[in-house]
Amino acid sequence: MHQFTDTSTKQTNLADDALTLLKRLIATPSFSREEEQTATVIEGFLQEKQIPFNRLKNNIWAQNLYFDPAKPTLLLNSHHDTVKPNKSWTLDPFEPLERDGKLFGLGSNDAGGCLVSLLATFAYFYDRTGMAYNIVIAATAEEEISGQDGLELLLPELPVFSFAIVGEPTEMQLAIAEKGLLVLDCTAHGVSGHAARDEGDNAIYKAIQDINWLTTYQFPKVSPTLGPVKLSVTIINAGMQHNVVPDACTFAIDVRVTEQYTLEEVNETIQANIQAEVKPRSIRLKPSSIPAEHPIVQAGLALGRYTYGSPTTSDQAVLNCPSLKCGPGHSGRSHSADEFIYLNEIAEGVTGYIQMLEQVL
């Protein structure tokens, strides 16, 4: 009983520390590429816990005290950058406000609650001996813009990971798959001419033919968790004046790719079936998943959680290991005006992560 009480007290204290840290982060602006000050706040938390850490630009990471290179390593990751507040905010986005069991503030839900819960969880296990896994915590930058100076920059400095938990608001449910993102910039080429005469080759009409194919084509392999690959034409531009047949029409395709295909395969299929010139913006943001049979997923299921596939993209996209997206908060509150997280979600996040890892470590 004494050991249980000590453990419970330690978790409660860490949850309180996590809430205090979250308030500090909210009060410190941290737009993507401007996260210097929140990185310093996170350094302060680790210093208070007497945990050595490393910093690369605005990314902070640390490893458990008894790190053993012979053991597999688990990554705990979340981000400390935020989007900019939209014009619908009625509160000060940088004033952490407790009201009606909620903590309001920019980044409170996405993904501050996840980050501080993971940092508290790391502190809980930091000096434990005899674990089956090493643990690395990484608090990273530029997630909101899929930037290259965040987790992607940090990965070459870190050990190879056996698996990862990425903190994003999922109500502590288990997102075992996540769609990747492929953005294609396309140009349909025609021949300019006078609109009043039968001249030219209208690039808009060529683009329409391509778009018709894109709106009707279905990739044959369907993911059991994420469903089909989704194609959306989201931008189109052509023409300079009403009486000139345009010789070019540009359009962009937003492609949400499941784990059934690589980004390269999807790109090649589209290029082979439309007339337009196709240029991918990047082949970086890959789909990700973790087997339902993985011990960390089974640990979550044993706690009464459920699995699902996430349509949104996170830092999982740059990882090359099985990864689980899981964290306190609700995805629907992300990027919303007067963003908040429930106070009890922070405590439940800390306890929930610890309970899952106790079954694995």
Image (tube, grey):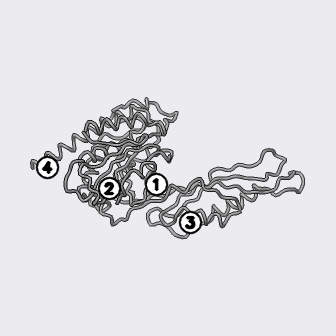
The total number of labels drawn is: 4
Mark 1 lies on residue: 318
Image spot of residue 26 (x, y percent): 39, 34
> Which residue reaches farthest left?
2
Q: Secondary structure at mark 4?
A: helix
Q: Amino acid at mark 4?
A: Phe
Position of the C terminus by quadrant: bottom left
Rounded to the nearest whole Å, what is the CA distance between mark 4 and mark 3? 52 Å
Q: Is residue 326 left or right of residue 358?
A: right
Q: Nearer the viewer, residue 65 or 226?
A: 65
Instruction: Give the mark, 2 or 3, whose residue is nearer the N terminus.
Output: 2
Q: Is residue 65 left or right of residue 41?
A: left
Q: Amino acid at mark 1?
A: Val
Q: Amino acid at mark 2?
A: Leu
28 w.r.t. 56: above or below: above
Graded by Cα atoms within 10 Å as few (under 14), some (14 to 19) or many (20 or more), the crowding at tag 2 reads many
Which residue does the image show at 40% across and 41% down from the upper left? 80
Graded by Cα atoms within 10 Å as few (under 14), some (14 to 19) or many (20 or more), the crowding at tag 3 reads few
Mark 4 lies on residue: 4
Circle number at residue 74: 2
The image quadrant that residue 104 belongs to is top left
Rounded to the nearest whole Å, what is the CA distance between mark 2 and mark 4? 25 Å
The image quadrant that residue 212 belongs to is bottom right
Q: Viewer-nearest of labels 4 and 3?
A: 3
Instruction: Give the mark, 2 or 4, whose residue is nearer the N terminus.
Output: 4
Mark 3 lies on residue: 265
327 w.r.t. 258: above or below: above
Q: Can the viewer see residue 356? A: no
Q: Are marks 4 and 3 in contact (CB under 8 Å)?
A: no
Instruction: Give the mark, 2 or 1, whose residue is nearer the N terminus.
Output: 2
Rounded to the nearest whole Å, what is the CA distance between mark 2 and mark 1? 16 Å
Rounded to the nearest whole Å, what is the CA distance between mark 1 and mark 3? 18 Å
